[in-house]
Amino acid sequence: MKRTNRFVQSLGVAICLLPSGEEIRVPIVPGILKHPTAEALAKMLEQPDVVRKYTITALQKAPWPVLRQFQRSWLRECLPKAKLDPCRSRALEFLLGD
């Protein structure tokens, strides 16, 4: 029997306005945060605290094809707060380098 694997896909983009006035665009990927549905997640990602938590969790768990969809500057800003193991941290620093 042939098995088909489904890869993680973005269902769209959420836009969040940070208190600094910067606009952040993040992909809506169900599964990064465990419990919300795709519709609920899209609404939740309009809040700056949720976007930060979502991005940090993505840095900790998501594969590179998902992380590539985030703004690199935003990932670099959240990277120090992610508390990653040294190997993943070095790999992401390399991939996010200019």
Image (cartoon, rainbow, N blue to C red):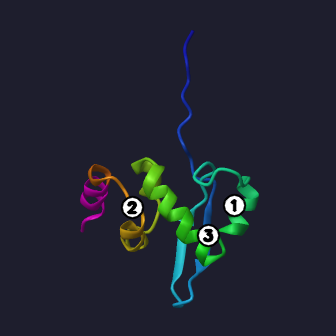
Residue at mark 3 to residue at mark 1: CA–CA distance: 9 Å
Residue at mark 2: 83
* Magenta segment main secondary structure: helix
User: Earlier along the polypeptide chain: callout 1 or callout 2?
Assistant: 1
Give the residue at x 60% y 75%.
Answer: 49
Q: Which residue type carries mark 1?
A: Leu
Q: Is mark 3 on a helix, strand or loop?
A: helix
Mark 2 is surrounded, within 10 Å at the Cα level, by few (under 14), some (14 to 19) or many (20 or more) other residues, namely few
Magenta segment, which residues? 89-98
The answer to whether residue 63 is left or right of residue 51 is left
Residue at mark 1: 41
Q: Which of marks 2 and 3 is in front?
A: 2
Queried whether the magenta region covers residue 65, the answer comes back as no
The mark found on residue 50 in the picture is 3
Q: Look at the image and tell me in which quarter the C terminus lies.
A: bottom left
Q: Where is residue 6 in the image (x, y as percent from the top left)?
A: 56, 34
Do the residues under discs 2 and 3 have CB atoms within 8 angstroms? Answer: no
Residue at mark 1 to residue at mark 2: CA–CA distance: 23 Å
Mark 3 is surrounded, within 10 Å at the Cα level, by few (under 14), some (14 to 19) or many (20 or more) other residues, namely some
Give the residue at x 56% y 63%.
Answer: 54
Q: Quadrant of residue 68?
A: bottom left
The answer to whether residue 48 is left or right of residue 20 is right
Which residue appears farthest toward the top when viewing the image? 1
Q: Nearer the viewer, mark 3 or mark 1?
A: 3
User: Earlier along the polypeptide chain: callout 2 or callout 3?
Assistant: 3
Q: Is mark 2 on a helix, strand or loop?
A: loop
